[in-house]
């Protein structure tokens, strides 16, 4: 299929004049495509859709699986996050806040399933209450609404939930139908003239210094494949710009192109989700329930979420793995998960908890998912570049720069220094979204985990802004 598409593009290129791009100051190019996006998760789809809006361009979205969003984008809690945990002046906070508003608006306008069900963070002792106070203080500092509930009101609203000391409510948290969202993004992208190719794996990347074009080697099943045997064909395409949004494969793909001193090591955190079915007549919760955050922990605790049908599920836990294709639920972690769930759900019927599914999150290191209160600016903004750059960022409007401006600074800072900081010395890893130094038109998106789904529309606009600034 890919070979046939490339042949069709070659014919069109013979009769269609090439288009000059804002991001290019070089002579007219004859690449197969204007934009190639690797990875058709929620973020890749959003990026491809934004780029396809530019008239006179061609955008190809490459996916190694047989359909969109089969990895991290669909194996998660489907939560629309409020942005409570990621610290000041980080891309995660900036993009989550912007993306949350865009996502609620898009879902309402396009009829994509979602619900603003709110979220509680519960404390069972004084130390956990201190963590809730820190979250509340941070939320106020970034204008995200949160408020403490009287325990009597909390018990009246959710009588099955235990909160011994305190409840912090986040009224802007919700849930979304991730599959419905990605189906809409795919359809919108295609309606703009974009093309998707599936079952296509990137095996090599090179850049021609003379033309500035990127060559992408791709392997995919050939037309001669049968149900019992698969014949692999290889193809090479060229593009003016290349966007690496490959999720779990993003770091290995980046390492195909960047020189060895700038290679990163991928880390993978597997999270198991647990289903719940019980004859217990106690009322099911209508709110998402999270335990108090634990600084340095790679997740947000084994929380209780609901889907749009009202079904309860718990998770995820955190298990560090080396194989990102390991999607087998780990039964040995069930008892530990139930112990944690029981702290806020005392009526849990343990026999009703079962293994459900797993998701794997791409990580830049074994850092925490939450910025510790009192962390230095360098810790909460681990990808902001040098200390002098961080100081210059604080001189921007209202004390911070726009997401696009942050990315531009990131793309101009020393990549090796960023690698060392992000992978060894910081307890929190921010998103990496940058045009790589000495590789104009190559945009890397690394460590795109939670809140990636919430942020996907904002990330799409950001990448468009990098290329069309």
Image (cartoon, helix red, strand yellow):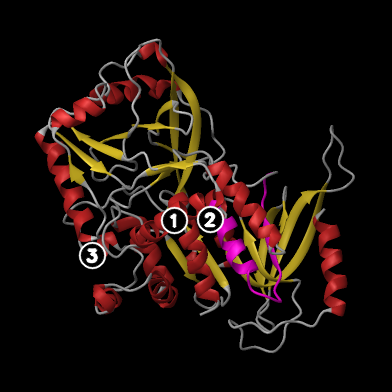
Residue on which disc 3 sits: 377
Around disc 1, counting alpha carbons within 10 Å, would you say few (fewer than 14), some (14 to 19), or many (20 or more)? Answer: many
Q: Is 303 on the left-hand or right-hand side of 106?
A: left
Query: Marks 3 and 2: which is nearer the front?
Result: 2
- Percent position of residue 151, x then y: 14, 31
Report helix, strand or loop for mark 2. helix
* Residue 362 to residue 358: above or below: below
Spatial CA span between label 1 and label 2: 8 Å
In the drawing, what numbered circle is on residue 43? 2
- Inspect this view and state whether residue 261 appears: no
* Quadrant position of residue 188: bottom right
| Residue in the image at 64% along x and 82% along y | 21
The residue lying toward the viewer, choosing from 210 and 8, is: 8
* Residue 272 to residue 294: above or below: above
Report helix, strand or loop for mark 1. helix
Outermost residue toward the left? 126
Q: Are marks 1 and 2 in contact (CB under 8 Å)?
A: yes
Residue on which disc 1 sits: 455
* Residue 220 to residue 125: above or below: below
* Magenta stretch in the rendered image: 42-65
Spatial CA span between label 1 and label 3: 22 Å
The answer to whether residue 454 is magenta is: no
| Residue in the image at 53% along x and 49% along y | 248
Q: Are marks 3 and 2 in contact (CB under 8 Å)?
A: no
Report helix, strand or loop for mark 3. helix
The residue lying toward the viewer, choosing from 408 and 418, is: 408
| Residue in the image at 40% along x and 72% along y | 410
Give whichever of discs 1 and 3 has the lower sequence position: 3
Around disc 2, counting alpha carbons within 10 Å, would you say few (fewer than 14), some (14 to 19), or many (20 or more)? Answer: many
The residue lying toward the viewer, choosing from 92 and 53, is: 53
């Amino acid at each position: 299929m890919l070979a046939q598409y490339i042949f069709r593009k070659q014919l069109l290129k013979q009769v269609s004049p090439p288009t000059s791009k804002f991001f290019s100051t070089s002579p007219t190019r004859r690449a197969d495509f204007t934009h190639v996006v690797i990875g058709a998760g929620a973020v890749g789809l959003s990026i491809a859709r934004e780029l396809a809006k530019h008239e006179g361009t061609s955008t190809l979205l490459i996916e190694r699986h047989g359909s969109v969003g089969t990895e991290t984008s669909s194996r998660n809690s489907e939560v629309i996050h409020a942005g409570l945990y990621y610290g000041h002046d980080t891309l995660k906070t900036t993009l989550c806040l912007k993306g949350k508003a865009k996502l609620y608006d898009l879902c309402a306008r396009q009829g994509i399933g979602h619900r603003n069900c709110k979220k509680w963070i519960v404390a069972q002792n004084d130390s956990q209450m201190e963590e809730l106070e820190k979250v509340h203080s941070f939320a106020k500092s970034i204008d995200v609404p949160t408020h403490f509930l009287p325990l009597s009101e909390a018990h009246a609203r959710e009588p099955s939930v235990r909160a011994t000391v305190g409840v912090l409510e986040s009224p802007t948290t919700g849930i979304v139908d991730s599959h419905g969202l990605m189906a809409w993004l795919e359809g919108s992208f295609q309606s703009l003239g974009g093309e998707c190719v599936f079952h296509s794996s990137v095996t090599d990347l090179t850049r021609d210094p003379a033309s500035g074009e990127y060559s992408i080697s791709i392997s995919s099943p050939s037309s001669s494949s049968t149900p019992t045997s698969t014949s692999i064909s290889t193809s090479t395409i060229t593009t003016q710009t290349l966007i690496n949004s490959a999720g779990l494969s993003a770091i290995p793909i980046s390492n195909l192109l960047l020189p060895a001193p700038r290679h990163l090591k991928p880390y993978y955190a597997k999270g198991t989700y647990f289903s719940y079915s019980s004859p217990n007549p106690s009322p099911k919760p209508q709110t998402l329930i999270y335990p108090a955050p634990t600084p340095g922990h790679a997740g947000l605790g084994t929380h209780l979420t609901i889907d749009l049908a009202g079904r309860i599920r718990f998770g995820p836990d955190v298990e560090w793995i080396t194989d990102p294709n390991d999607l087998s639920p780990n039964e040995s972690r069930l008892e530990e998960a139930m112990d944690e769930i029981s702290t806020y759900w005392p009526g849990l019927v343990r026999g009703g908890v079962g293994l459900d599914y797993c998701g794997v999150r791409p990580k830049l290191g074994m850092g925490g998912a939450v910025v510790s209160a009192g962390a230095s600016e360098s810790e909460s903004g681990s990808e902001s570049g040098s200390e002098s750059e961080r100081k210059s960022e604080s001189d921007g409007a209202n004390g911070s720069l726009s997401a696009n401006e942050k990315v531009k600074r990131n793309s101009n800072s020393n990549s090796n220094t960023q690698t060392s900081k992000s992978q060894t010395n910081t307890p929190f890893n921010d998103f990496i979204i940058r045009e790589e130094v000495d590789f104009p038109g190559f945009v890397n998106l690394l460590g795109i985990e939670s809140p990636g789904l919430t942020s996907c529309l904002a990330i799409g606009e950001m990448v468009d802004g990098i290329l069309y600034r």
